[in-house]
Image (cartoon, coloured by chain):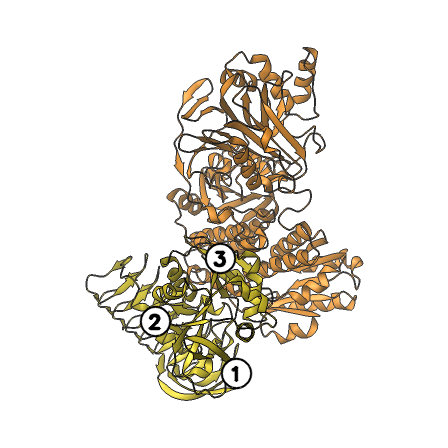
Chain colours: A yellow, B orange
């Protein structure tokens, strides 16, 4: 059996986090999202995998080349839509295949339910169906699918995970996959609806925190590096090689820390935190329920909670992220969201900065003692 | 310059050799050839002009478990079928492949012709085949040992013969490594073709002759049997795969953040630390991109550490008066070479050694010739570089140079440079499409910069000319007025590196001068530099960082510019015409 993973999209609603990487490459529990998809396929014995890369494909290719199981890569030069992406993979497909988005988490057991069906889709109940393709099901088969409707009276959504025969290529007319699926249904084609067990998408940046908490539970607690004898490490904690955990530091799992990090004395790392590689956390700093990506640094006496920090951020001493709830306008939709801060790549801030429930773009510089509110665009200077 | 490969073992040799030649193709692509020893005796040969990747090879006629192959970068004789290796003796019993130059071949050829041998090619290599023939009476090892005594010059040789079951390898000043498999042995010019078969290798010394059989190897040096240790290589197979990238060059450009980080962080051996800390002056010898890395090192070392540094093109080093050994040998000669086999650099290094100067090599290839000649070696961690145009190895050389700087003048830059990979990663996101549109239609392009950006401009011009075939010149911005200004027209764009710091103001004046002569100017500067953006035709913003890191980001942007221009012109990016990866002839 073959599988096609669509990973060409940027994931614009996740900006500013997708400036240098496609959505499928955003690290969650220190691994790119696409890795969980590949693992779920491998656990079902599916090793013939085609990945469609596009947006920032170099990043994706470098990652895929280091996988243990080799995958085939096809490039979608322009990101025109999911059906177009699938069409790009057509020359590599010989028979029945699975189609999966590379930027959603899916478990192996759900894939086992669908892999032997001819034409089928994994569906799942969701409290906010209007962000997804809403699936109407009759007698166990898909009767219609509506992409991102304004209002939805059904709470079943398509996960975007299908098993298809090669027939589907005959129905691809437009660039979007739901159109092809609808055309197939109109033509009398039957697509079985199968319930997914464990599936989760991160639509907006703050959704990553929830996904991170869930996936941290699966990370094996291996300990590398050097851990001070007076540090307290409790629960499922992964520590990468070369990482130094200083004296009197407290870490409560589930927590994942990458390679070559420095966690200075008297720091506290609380559950739900993923820390990438080469990160430095200075003394007396408290981090909870956050994603800190590679090459970032947090100054001493800081308090970082419910925050996503992309790569290369440098925060000064006494930085605070204040959790609040506010309305955010993203791609024309107004959403209510509660979190600490979402910081793009290479945000630098001077000491005594407060990030108050805000979405901060890439390469933003913040002057001393500022309270950063709400939304700040790329390359801005806050003084 | 020429790649050779040999195999003896249980598998069918021809397919394996063809696969290996494809991996070696970057060393030369004028012609290729394979010889095998079929089980029913004799030697089967197939050779052809052109590239192995573009030609079918008739595998059916090449049976046997024992064979040699060659991919050529022509030196003696035009690249046609006749001059393609392998070469044979008069009786078609011995086949040889050779990388290097036999300097006394004309004289040997006359002698051999006098003794009745018939030559079928114009190459220097063929004399070796006939010499071996004269000594061969069933023991090929002995025959090769006798034959090489008459040879002057450089060689890596692989020889098979109908009457002997072994594969003979001989090395003198040209690269040759042996790969040790399970019940099979390999020999090749470099590690690239070996990685998919084995990670255990033996590096031969100059003067070694080895007899390979499936079960093992016998090595003899100056008439005595010797043993050479088996080493494990850390390079990975996926390093030599394209892995979905359109070109190796693009793949290697995108590996640069990691390459810089790993090279900079690599442990410095005591020998290197000692050599560097004792030096009161440094001479760098290098060629091509490595020379530009040396120039950058000179700018940084002299301005930041106050240490006098001279930089020499390795091929010219010998023609200057020999360098004087400083007081109590305090001078250090640093040889920079990606492959570790660059003939000119090796020659310069040997000359320095002859004057009792202490030597340090910066190279990418473990076990390469330069590591044997230099007193100590700083090994960069770039991994195999396949594209002929150097990108990641140049960045790795800069990483190694900067590491040496931190050794020389305390660790004050450590923190700045340890974040360099982030800046390089950021520079990779730069969009150069507007500049590509200008360059692709230009007949001539000028690259200008000042201070440490002058070597960056030279390197940018080198990348541009080697892969796009557009005439490109790098100039110190101040030098432009002394002549090249006469060439400026609306069809000769200039690329100006105008970074904040000491050079910014005067670069802006230079840009205005060029604009006044009608040349379109592409300015590379930091994001938000409104003054620069206003005067140039196309502004390429790079991320704002410390000055020493801007040398790196500017370099990366110019690599992308050259790559995308070559792509727009549909050039053969990984294998530009007339060039080969490591220049192992002088």
The image position of residue B458, as x and y in percent, is 64, 54
The mark nearer the N terminus, 1 or 2, is 2
The answer to whether residue B104 shows anywhere in this view is no
Residue lying at 49% horizontally and 57% vertically, measured from the top left? A62
Dot 3: chain letter: A
- Nearer to us of marks 1 and 2 is 2
Badge 1 element: loop
Contact between marks 1 and 2 (CB within 8 A): the answer is: no
- Nearer to us of marks 3 and 2 is 2
Dot 1: chain letter: A
**Camera-side residue of A226 and B549:** A226
Badge 3 element: helix
Contact between marks 3 and 2 (CB within 8 A): the answer is: no
- Nearer to us of marks 3 and 1 is 1
Residue lying at 58% horizontally and 62% vertically, measured from the top left? A88
The reply to whether label 3 and label 2 mark residues of one chain is: yes
Reading the image, the residue beneath label 2 is A197
The reply to whether label 3 and label 1 mark residues of one chain is: yes
Reading the image, the residue beneath label 1 is A331
Dot 2: chain letter: A
The image position of residue B135, as x and y in percent, is 56, 13
Disc 3 versus disc 1: distance between alpha carbons?
A: 30 Å
The image position of residue A294, as x and y in percent, is 41, 65
Disc 3 versus disc 2: distance between alpha carbons?
A: 31 Å
Which disc number belongs to residue A62?
3
Which disc number belongs to residue B214?
none
The answer to whether residue B261 shows anywhere in this view is yes
The crowd level at tag 1 (other Cα within 10 Å; few <14, some 14-19, many 20+) is few
Residue lying at 72% horizontally and 53% vertically, measured from the top left? B470
The mark nearer the N terminus, 3 or 1, is 3
């Amino acid at each position: 059996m073959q599988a096609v993973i669509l990973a060409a999209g940027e994931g614009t609603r996740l900006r500013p986090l997708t400036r240098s990487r496609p959505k499928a490459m955003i690290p969650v529990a220190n691994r790119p999202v696409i890795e969980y998809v590949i693992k779920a396929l491998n656990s079902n014995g599916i090793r013939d995998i085609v990945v469609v890369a596009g947006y920032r494909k170099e990043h994706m290719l470098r990652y895929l080349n280091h996988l243990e199981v080799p995958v085939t890569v096809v490039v979608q030069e322009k990101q025109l839509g999911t059906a177009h992406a699938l069409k790009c993979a057509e020359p590599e497909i010989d028979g029945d295949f699975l189609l999966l988005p590379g930027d959603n988490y899916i478990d192996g057991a759900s894939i086992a339910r669908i892999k032997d069906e001819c034409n089928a889709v994994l569906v799942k109940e969701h409290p906010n169906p209007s962000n997804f393709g809403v699936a109407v099901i009759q007698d166990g088969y898909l009767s219609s699918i509506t992409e991102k409707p304004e209002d939805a009276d059904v709470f079943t959504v398509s996960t975007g995970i299908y098993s298809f025969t090669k027939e589907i290529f005959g129905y691809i007319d437009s660039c979007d996959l739901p159109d092809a699926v609808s055309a197939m249904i109109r033509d009398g084609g039957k697509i079985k609806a199968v319930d997914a067990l464990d599936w989760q998408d991160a639509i907006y940046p703050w959704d990553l925190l929830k996904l991170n908490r869930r996936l941290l539970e699966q990370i094996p607690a291996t300990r590398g590096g050097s851990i001070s004898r007076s540090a307290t490490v409790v629960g499922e904690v992964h520590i990468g090689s070369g990482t130094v955990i200083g004296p009197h530091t407290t870490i409560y799992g589930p927590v994942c820390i990458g390679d070559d990090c420095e966690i200075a004395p008297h720091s506290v790392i609380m559950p739900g935190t993923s820390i990438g590689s080469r990160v430095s956390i200075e003394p007396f700093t408290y981090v909870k329920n956050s994603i800190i990506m590679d090459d970032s640094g947090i100054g001493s006496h800081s308090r970082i909670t419910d925050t996503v920090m992309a790569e290369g951020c440098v925060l000064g001493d006494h930085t605070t992220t204040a959790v609040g709830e506010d309305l955010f306008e993203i791609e024309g939709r107004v959403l209510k969201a509660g979190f600490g801060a979402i910081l793009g790549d290479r945000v630098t801030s001077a000491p005594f900065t407060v990030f108050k429930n805000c979405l901060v773009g890439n390469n933003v510089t913040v002057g001393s003692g500022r309270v950063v509110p709400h939304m700040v665009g790329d390359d801005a200077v806050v003084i | 310059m020429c790649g050779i490969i040999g195999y003896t073992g249980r598998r069918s040799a021809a397919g394996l050799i063809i696969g290996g030649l494809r991996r070696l193709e970057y060393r030369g692509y004028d012609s290729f050839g394979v010889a095998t020893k079929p089980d029913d005796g004799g030697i089967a040969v197939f050779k052809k002009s052109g590239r192995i990747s573009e030609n079918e090879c008739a595998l059916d006629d090449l049976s046997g478990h024992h064979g040699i192959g060659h991919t050529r970068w022509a030196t003696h004789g035009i690249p046609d079928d006749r001059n393609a290796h392998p070469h044979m003796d008069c009786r078609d019993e011995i086949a040889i492949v050779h990388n290097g130059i036999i300097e006394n071949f004309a004289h040997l050829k006359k002698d051999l012709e006098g003794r009745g041998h018939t030559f079928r090619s114009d190459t220097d290599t063929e004399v070796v085949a006939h010499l071996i023939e004269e000594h061969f009476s069933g023991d090929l090892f002995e025959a090769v040992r006798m034959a090489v005594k008459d040879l002057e010059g450089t060689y890596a040789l692989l020889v098979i013969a109908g009457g002997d079951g072994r594969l003979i390898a001989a090395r003198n000043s040209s690269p040759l490594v042996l790969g040790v498999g399970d019940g099979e042995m390999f020999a090749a010019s470099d590690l690239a073709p070996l990685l998919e078969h084995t990670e255990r290798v033996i590096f031969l010394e100059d003067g070694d002759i080895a007899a390979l059989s499936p079960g093992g190897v016998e090595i003899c040096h100056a008439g005595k049997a010797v043993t050479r240790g088996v080493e494990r290589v850390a390079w990975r197979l996926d390093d030599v795969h394209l892995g979905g990238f359109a070109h190796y060059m693009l793949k290697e450009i995108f590996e640069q953040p990691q390459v810089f980080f790993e090279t900079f962080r690599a442990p410095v051996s005591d020998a290197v630390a000692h050599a560097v800390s004792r030096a009161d002056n440094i001479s760098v010898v290098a060629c091509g991109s490595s020379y530009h890395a040396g120039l950058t090192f000179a700018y940084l070392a002299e301005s930041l550490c106050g240490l006098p540094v001279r930089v020499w093109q390795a091929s010219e080093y010998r023609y200057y008066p020999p360098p004087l050994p400083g007081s109590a040998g305090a001078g250090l000669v640093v040889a920079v070479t990606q492959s570790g086999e660059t003939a000119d650099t090796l020659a310069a290094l040997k000359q320095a050694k002859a004057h009792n100067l202490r030597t340090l090599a910066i190279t990418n290839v473990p076990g390469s010739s330069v590591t044997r000649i230099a007193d100590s070696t700083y090994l960069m961690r770039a991994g195999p570089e396949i594209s002929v145009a150097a990108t990641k190895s140049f960045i790795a050389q800069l990483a190694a140079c900067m590491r040496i700087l931190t050794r020389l003048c305390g660790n004050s830059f450590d923190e700045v440079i340890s974040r360099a990979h982030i800046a390089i990663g950021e520079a990779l996101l730069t969009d150069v499409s507007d500049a590509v549109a200008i360059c692709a239609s230009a007949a001539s392009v000028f690259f200008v910069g000042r201070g440490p950006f002058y070597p960056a401009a030279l390197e940018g011009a080198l990348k541009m000319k080697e892969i796009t075939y557009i005439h490109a010149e790098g100039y110190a911005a101040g030098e432009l007025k002394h002549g090249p200004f006469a060439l400026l027209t609306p069809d000769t764009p200039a690329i100006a590196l105008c970074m904040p710091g000491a050079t910014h103001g005067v670069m802006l004046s230079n840009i205005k001068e060029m604009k006044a002569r009608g040349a379109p100017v592409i300015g590379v500067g930091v994001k938000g530099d409104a003054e620069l953006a206003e005067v140039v035709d196309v502004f390429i913003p790079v991320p704002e960082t410390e000055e020493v890191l801007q040398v790196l980001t500017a370099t990366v942007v110019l690599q992308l510019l050259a790559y995308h221009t070559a792509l727009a012109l549909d050039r053969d990016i990984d294998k530009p015409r007339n060039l080969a990866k490591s220049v192992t002839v002088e």
